[in-house]
Each structure stands twice: as C-alpha cells, then as structure tokens.
Image (spheres, grey):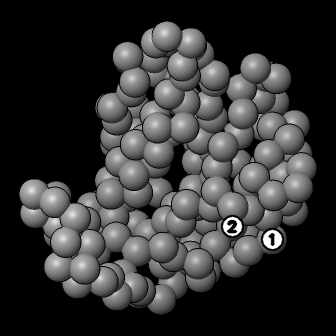
Amino acid sequence: MDFFEAIEKRYSFRGEYTDKTVSKQDMRKILDAGIRAPSGRNGQTTSFIAVTDKDLLKKIAGVIDKPCVKTAPLIIAVLTEKVEVFEGRSFEIEDYGAAVENILLAATALGYASLWLDGYTGSGNNSRRLAEILDVPSHLTVRTILPVGVPAEEGKQRERKAFEERVYLEKYR
C-alpha cells in the first residue's frame, strides 16, 4: 500500500481484533516508523514498549477496559521523557504525536488497525497504573497505548470536512 492510500485508509478502530498475531517483522517495521518520526532538536524524547505477553495484555486491559484493548495481540505503550533541548523547551508532546502518527500509518500500510488511546491513558491515574505494570521508571511518562491487530470487522475512516473548509490559500478566507 502506498503512503497516500495508507492515509486515506487509516481509521480509529475500537472493536475486537481477530486472534491473528502481529509478526515480529511487522512489529519491528511499525516501531521503526515511530523511531523515525521527526523530533524537536533531535531530542528523541519518545520510546516504546511492545507488549505481546498475554498476562501483561490482560493487566493492561484491566486498566483500560475496551474491546480493542482486551483483544489486541500487540499493545504499544508510548513513553515520553521531558528533556529540555532548546531555550528551556521540551518537545516531548510534538515528538510523541509525530511518532504515534507514523505508527498508525505503518500499521495501516501493513494491513492492521489501531487506535490512539490518549484520553483513556491520561484519565485518572491510568498512566501511573500502566507504568507500574510495565516497570516504567519515574522519569518517563506513559503517554498513550496503541492496540494493534487485524480487526474482526473492517472499518473505514470517518467523514472529513471538505478541503475548502479547512485549507485557505494565502490568507484566512
């Protein structure tokens, strides 16, 4: 699948996954896409934990009780570190956003579905609970989790506003 087709086909999958695993080769390609994302001042503030162990997957589903989390054969935990890289600024949020988008597009290109679960991960003490399950050191933050797998039911991208409603040439309107 080419790049633009992956963009058109990427959608947020909230349903159940089949029991088909994500191959190690595909998992590596997906994670490499995250590593290769842009990073402010090359701070490389984002790291990842790929979880395939059934006991750990079950514990994660105990924190975020959603069908896609309960049935995912792979969950990628996206971690960030606040590192000041330019005039007292850290680009951890920008870095992690770019990494997640690369991961979502790579997963789509390889025939998988995923979902950016930022809201659920950051709710209450979920981030801390996930950090405890995954032995994440305290200087890192579990920013989101991304369940990845073959969807039991195909989905499609939700409607987007027309190009002309969101893109302006030269000046706003």
Which of the two residues, 14 or 94, is positioned nearer the viewer here? 94
Which of the two residues, 62 or 82, is positioned nearer the viewer here? 82
| Residue 32 figure quarter | top left
Tell me which residue sits at (48%, 73%) in the image: 12
Tell me which residue sits at (54%, 38%) in the image: 93
**Under tag 2, what secondary structure?**
helix
Number of marks present in the image shown:
2
Q: Residues within 10 Å of mark 1 (few under 14, many from 20)?
A: few
Point out the image quarter for the C terminus. Answer: bottom left
Q: Position of residue 92 (x, y in %)?
A: 54, 30
Give the residue pinned by disc 1.
65
Q: Position of residue 85 (x, y in %)?
A: 49, 12
| Amino acid under disc 2 | Val
The answer to whether residue 86 is visible is yes
Depicted 128 relative to depicted 170: above or below: above
Point out the image quarter for the N terminus. Answer: bottom left
Q: Residues within 10 Å of mark 2 (few under 14, many from 20)?
A: many
Relative to 96, is 143 on the left or the right? right
| Amino acid under disc 1 | Asp
Give the residue pinned by disc 2.
69
Q: Position of residue 120 (x, y in %)?
A: 74, 62
Report if the CB atoms under discs 1 and 2 are less than 8 Å apart: yes
